[in-house]
Amino acid sequence: MIRLENLSKIYRSGSSEVAALKDVNLTFPQKGMVFVVGKSGSGKSTLLNLMAGMDGASGGTVTANGLALGRDIDYDAYRNNAIGFIFQEFNLNQGLNAEQNVLLSERLKRNRADRKKAARALDAVGLSDKAKKKIQQLSGGEQQRVAIARALIKEPKIVLADEPTGKLDEANGKILFDILKKLSETVLVVVVSHDRESAERYADRIIELSDGRVVSDKIKNPLFLEDTEVNDAVLYLPYHKKITQKDVDFLNQNKDKLTAVLHETRFKSHPASDNFSLENNADKSFLKDKKSLKPGDVFFLSWRNLAARKFRTVGTIFICIVMFAVLGLCVTILNYNEFQANARTFIKNNEGEIVLYQGAYNSYGGLIPKSGNKISDADAAFLKGKFPE
């Protein structure tokens, strides 16, 4: 499903460089629960961000169903159609209720808001009775489950979770991992976590990173076996094995001895009377057009955000009015011209003339020079045409 080949990520700041990942090679199957563990700064979150298409690699490739991210697959389309991401910070819209937050994923894909689909997603995380609750009315564990439901409604191929229990207590953390474990029966779930106890309890596979490199890759489930194994007439093929024509010939020769073959879309199986054959596993569904919110949805979300923060909105508007008033006053003061102001008064009082000579002037009716008795070119231009020379 997902293959990381010679993957590296370097962060640069001025003349300094930090290598977050160094030549990582990993392959993930279509389903199962994988934990990525390691100390802070080991590269766990960077790995997850590269798998999600939220960041670009400095070297190497991320391949999804035979298609390379950034080359064969548009990042936005990939995230929108294939990835369900669960954040540690929940990242829920405070202006929407639980149901509306879940439906936001569908709005991003410009799909019709299907409330039945949202209800099924909320029911899957045990929140069917909290659909109309505001986010502020939910506990931390319930908010994280809303975030999972938001990921589920997309029907993603891969669910990626970055420290999903980091802000939860032990009881809510167990509920969350139970939900993800159930989900991993049908899709791939990759969890970044410091919780090694939960990793040992729930994971089918545990990958440990240190200084940007894989230092341990522990298989705990037959789905992730390193070697081919036959158990109860079922042939298990390792997730990382590249199927060759020789392997296919072997399968065809021994198919009568097997009742099933566990495979990862690298070849296709036919009814018992037919043969196995290789197939190209590039999944073009990842190439769907990228989409964004409709203008109406943008207006709706903006309005709900403002409505959810009434006092903050009113305060912001008041501060803006005061700032514009002060700005206008400053502009008026900076552009004030004493000479021209006096000239306007002089004209308004219907005084008959102003006498200019040798670049200086005499004033009548209270016209006062701005400085000395020299008239500037700008002031002369202002007076030109208003009085006879």
Image (cartoon, rainbow, N blue to C red):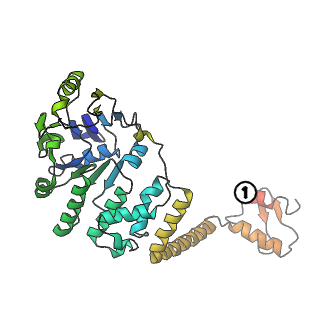
Q: Tell me: 236 left or right of 268.
A: left
| Residue 368 can be seen in this image | no
- Name which quarter of the figure residue 351 lies in: bottom right
Direction bottom: furthest residue: 311
- Name which quarter of the figure residue 71 lies in: top left
Q: Please tell me which residue is depicted at 30% across the width and 37% down the height of the picture.
A: 62
Where is residue 258? Give x, y as percent.
17, 34
| Residue 338 can be seen in this image | yes
Classify mark 1: helix, strand or loop. helix
Q: Please tell me which residue is depicted at 18% across the width and 31% down the height of the picture.
A: 256
Where is residue 353? Give x, y as percent.
86, 68
Q: Please tell me which residue is depicted at 78% across the width and 70% down the height of the picture.
A: 344
In the depicted structure, whether residue 360 falls above or below residue 15: below
- Name which quarter of the figure residue 70 lies in: top left
Q: Quadrant of the C terminus?
A: bottom right
Q: Tell me: 208 left or right of 388.
A: left
Q: Quadrant of the N terminus?
A: top left
Where is residue 378? Give x, y as percent.
72, 57
Q: Nearer the viewer, residue 363 or 166?
A: 166
**Residue tagged 1:** 378
Q: Please tell me which residue is depicted at 43% across the width and 61% down the height of the picture.
A: 103
Q: Nearer the viewer, residue 361 or 272?
A: 272
Direction front: furthest residue: 273
Disc count in the image? 1
Where is residue 321? Give x, y as percent.
56, 73
In the depicted structure, whether residue 246 falls above or below residue 324: above
In the depicted structure, whether residue 312 falls above or below residue 215: below
